[in-house]
Image: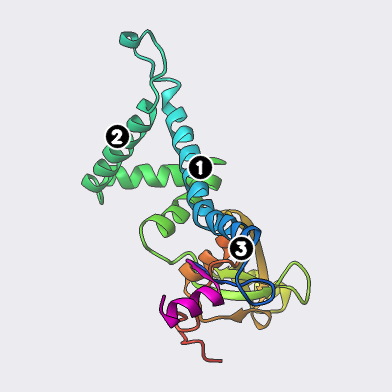
């Protein structure tokens, strides 16, 4: 065995996360190696298993939306696993094709205006449409800027996103220049809290919207490096 091999063996055992050292800096014991291997396995397989579990849950949820009603006589009216999911994909594809085909047509515009004006229905329809356009079409106009705000109490900072400018009448009543700030929840950023905060109490940061959402979803585990921040990490 060469000197390099003996030194490496004496100094520890390599795994994908670095060198395993014993308590006295020497060769690690059996239980210590097993513990490190177990933790390494959890770190490698844990995120994969969680992602697969979420995807399976989403699949069954989408499959159940139409699958519970699409029971064909050729199959004795039994539910066919996956048929509802395929039907939902076909429905979305056909709807999207028709929307592109009829984009700009008076009928489509009239339909959209009618839904946007229906009492009660418009309360859900308008925000859902705008949020869907922001998240699915690549237009990041809903979340304009990543900011820091002191929430839920002074001294504790939270990541927020500046949204649309609030009505000027609200700022005049409050006696301050108010900004609309959405503070999302972890790990589901589609829920959160909406606040009107004076502009002097809002701190803009050099993060993109995608970077801010990643930090919120991961609970801070996933964070951009200083070099990836658009301001270069400069203070």
In this picture, residue 126 sits left or right of residue 105? right
Q: Which mark is residue 219?
A: 3
User: Residue 170 occupies which quadrant of the picture?
Assistant: bottom right
- Label 1, label 2: how many angstroms apart (C-alpha)? 24 Å
In the image, 171 versus 224, the foreground residue is 224
Q: Which residue is mark 2?
A: 90
**Tag 1 residue:** 53
Magenta highlight range: 1-15
- Can residue 109 be spotted in the picture? yes
For residue 96, side relative to residue 116 (left or right): left
Does 235 sit above or below residue 230? below
Q: Quadrant of residue 219?
A: bottom right
Q: Nearer the viewer, mark 1 or mark 3?
A: 1
Mark before the other along the chain sequence, 1 or 2:
1
Quarter that holds the C terminus:
bottom right
> Which residue is outermost to the left?
101
What residue appears at the point 41 percent right and 79 percent down from the top-left corner?
2
217 part of magenta stretch: no
Pick whichever, 42 or 64, lies toward us: 42
Q: Is residue 185 visible?
A: no
């Amino acid at each position: 065995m060469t000197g390099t091999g003996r030194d490496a063996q004496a100094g520890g055992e390599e795994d994908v996360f670095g060198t395993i050292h014993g308590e006295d800096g020497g060769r690690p014991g059996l239980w210590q190696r097993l513990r490190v291997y177990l933790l390494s396995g959890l770190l490698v397989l844990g995120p994969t298993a969680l992602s697969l579990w979420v995807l399976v849950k989403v699949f069954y949820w989408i499959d159940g939306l139409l699958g519970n009603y699409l029971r064909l006589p050729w199959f004795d009216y039994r539910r066919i696993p996956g048929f509802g999911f395929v039907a939902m994909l076909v429905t979305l594809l056909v709807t999207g094709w028709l929307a592109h085909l009829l984009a700009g047509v008076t009928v489509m515009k009239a339909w959209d205006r009618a839904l946007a004006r229906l009492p009660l229905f418009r309360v859900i329809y308008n925000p859902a449409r705008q949020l869907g356009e922001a998240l699915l079409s690549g237009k990041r106009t809903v979340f304009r800027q990543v900011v820091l705000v002191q929430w839920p109490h002074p001294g504790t900072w939270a990541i927020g996103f500046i949204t649309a400018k609030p009505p000027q009448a609200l700022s005049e009543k409050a006696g301050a220049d108010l900004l609309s700030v959405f503070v999302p929840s972890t790990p589901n950023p589609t829920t959160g809290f909406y606040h009107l905060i004076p502009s002097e109490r809002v701190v803009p940061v050099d993060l993109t919207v995608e970077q801010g959402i990643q930090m919120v979803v991961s609970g801070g585990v996933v964070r951009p490096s200083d070099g990836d921040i658009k301001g270069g990490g400069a203070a």
